[in-house]
Image: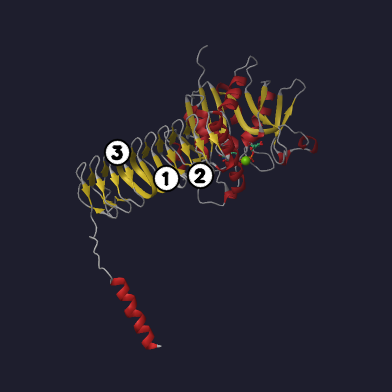
């Protein structure tokens, strides 16, 4: 089949007044990713030839968030048809199919987008394909009015609908697929004689019909096209997204002991037979290999964990942590920008930052790599099989050689040779009988005062 080009236009010029936010609506995050980023990710699955994001004036932060995709500016918000017109400049001469989406419907799936593009390319060659849905509460959605043959005749906005039209349960989800060759002409004829005085994209259907062009509906699930207009809807969308991500993790062979309390990012990768305890949060960029156990209350972000490792409970793995095979990271341990090599153990109350911990090294409770002097960050290198005694501070830059031992309570400021023992703390003094004499004197003083 010859390649038929595809363009996607994402409308994101809305201010999102009901969010009561200084941030443009489409930059509010769902599963850690801006809403518009979810829409772009779904669109990217279709491998489109062009993508244009329509933004409002001064929305430079949205433009930066969607880069390298180009943006078109809609100078005034005069309705959804006017917003699509803003993209015409970037699509000049484009004759393929054009998919129009909203930036605030982050749950839309590539499957639904594909179904719409396929319907657009059907034998009947519809000028417009609209995504329909039957929500439990049709509320103020536009209604899809079908003709006797099941084709789409028109869309009426709720405010402009008659009682009879309002009783229709098939609603406009908002997404549309156009034949690019006919789109510009049709949309340019849309006027604004309606209840809101806006240029409604939905009017395109009636205009196409008066020219005898067929229009069609693809029905989708309401949950996919929930639009976010308020913080409560944002939370609802987050809930649905997390449910999807949890299911995907389980479908891929991970056990989630309490799925509802585990939070994922869209790019979290878990291997087979990974077990995740309750209350674990996966920030962006986490890859976990097979047979890893992540115990309760851990937070991971931009880290990789190799097979067989055991993490937590209560561990925090920050960006740049690389946990090797069968390594153990225990409670109240924070790891940042550090490689913990195979079989190493960092089990209690420790901070390891800007460091390497060699294979099978053992890091005692309360160890701190002092990596920052208020200006720069410095590296700590701990060799394979080294043993760091509890409550030690390793003042970077510093190296502890393979197999070396650092005595508990040390403050290590210079390199320790391999297989050496270093101890860096006040030497212990002993004063036989001192404590008994001290107590006796104090008791005598107290008795005299009484
Ligand atoms: C729209 C549809 C309605 C449908 C509903 C589904 C129209 C006229 N109505 O109504 O039939 O049931 O979506 O959610 O299309 N936008 C711009 N510039 C504008 C206006 C809007 O970029 O000038 C963007 C908004 O940021 C938003 C999207 O277009 O992402 C939809 O606009 P919105 O005002 O939410 O339309 P609805 O009234 O919900
Ligand atoms: Mg809306």
**Residue reaching furthest right?**
164
* Residue 312 in picture, x, y percent from top left: 45, 44
Q: Is residue 242 left or right of residue 310?
A: right
Disc 1 target residue: 330
Give the mark nearer the N terminus: 1 vs 3.
1
Q: Viewer-proximal residue, 414 or 102?
A: 414
Residue at the image point whose x is 38% and y is 88% from the top? 449
Rendered image quadrant of residue 304: top left
Q: Is residue 121 above or below residue 319?
A: above
Specify how the rendered protein is coloured.
secondary structure
Q: Secondary structure at mark 1?
A: strand
| Mark 2, other Cα within 10 Å: few <14 / some 14–19 / many ≥20 | many
* Residue 191 in picture, x, y percent from top left: 64, 35
Rendered image: mark on residue 296: 2
Rendered image: mark on residue 358: 3
* Residue 123 in picture, x, y percent from top left: 63, 14
Whether residue 262 appears in this view of the structure is yes
Q: CA distance from mark 1 to mark 3?
A: 17 Å
Rendered image quadrant of residue 441: bottom left
Q: Secondary structure at mark 2?
A: loop
* Residue 389 in picture, x, y percent from top left: 30, 50
Q: Is residue 15 above or below residue 72?
A: below
Q: CA distance from mark 2 to mark 3?
A: 26 Å
Q: Secondary structure at mark 3?
A: loop
């Amino acid at each position: 089949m010859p390649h038929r080009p595809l363009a996607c236009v994402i409308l994101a010029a809305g201010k999102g007044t009901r969010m009561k936010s200084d941030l443009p609506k489409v930059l509010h995050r769902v599963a850690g990713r801006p809403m518009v980023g979810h829409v772009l990710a779904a669109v990217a699955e279709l491998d489109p030839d062009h993508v244009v994001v329509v933004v409002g004036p001064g929305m430079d932060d949205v433009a930066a968030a969607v880069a390298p995709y180009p943006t078109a500016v809609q100078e005034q918000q005069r309705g959804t048809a006017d917003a699509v017109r803003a993209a015409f400049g970037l699509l000049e001469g484009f004759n393929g199919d054009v998919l129009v989406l909203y930036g605030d419907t982050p749950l839309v799936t590539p499957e639904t987008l594909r179904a719409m593009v396929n319907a657009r390319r059907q034998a009947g060659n519809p000028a417009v394909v609209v995504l329909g849905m039957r929500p439990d509460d049709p509320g103020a959605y536009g209604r899809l009015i079908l003709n006797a043959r099941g084709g789409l005749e028109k869309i009426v906005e709720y405010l402009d609908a008659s009682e009879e039209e309002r009783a229709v349960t098939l609603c406009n989800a908002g997404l549309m697929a156009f034949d690019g060759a006919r789109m510009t002409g049709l949309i340019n004829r849309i006027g604004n004689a309606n209840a809101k005085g806006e240029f409604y994209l939905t009017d395109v259907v009636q205009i196409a019909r008066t020219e005898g062009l067929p229009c069609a509906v693809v029905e989708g699930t309401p949950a996919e096209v929930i639009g976010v207009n308020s913080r409560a809807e944002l939370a609802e969308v987050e809930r649905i997204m997390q449910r999807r991500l949890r299911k995907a993790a389980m479908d891929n062979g991970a056990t989630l002991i309490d799925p509802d309390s585990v939070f994922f990012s869209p790019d979290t990768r878990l291997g087979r037979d990974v077990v995740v305890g309750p209350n674990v949060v996966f920030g962006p960029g986490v890859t976990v290999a097979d047979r890893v156990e992540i115990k309760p209350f851990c937070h991971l972000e931009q880290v990789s964990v190799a097979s067989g490792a055991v993490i937590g409970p209560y561990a925090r793995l920050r960006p740049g942590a690389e946990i090797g095979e069968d390594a153990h990271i225990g409670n109240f341990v924070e790891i940042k920008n550090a490689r913990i090599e195979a079989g190493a153990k960092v089990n209690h109350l420790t901070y390891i930052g800007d460091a390497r911990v060699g294979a099978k090294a053992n890091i005692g409770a309360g160890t701190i790599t002092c990596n920052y002097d208020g200006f720069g960050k410095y590296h700590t290198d701990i060799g394979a099989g080294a043993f760091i005694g509890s409550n030690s501070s390793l003042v970077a830059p510093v190296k502890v050689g393979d197999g070396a031992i650092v005595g508990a309570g040390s403050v290590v400021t210079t390199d320790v040779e391999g297989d050496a023992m270093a101890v860096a703390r006040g030497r212990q003094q002993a004063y036989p009988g001192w404590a008994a004499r001290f107590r006796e004197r104090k008791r005598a003083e107290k008795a005299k005062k009484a």
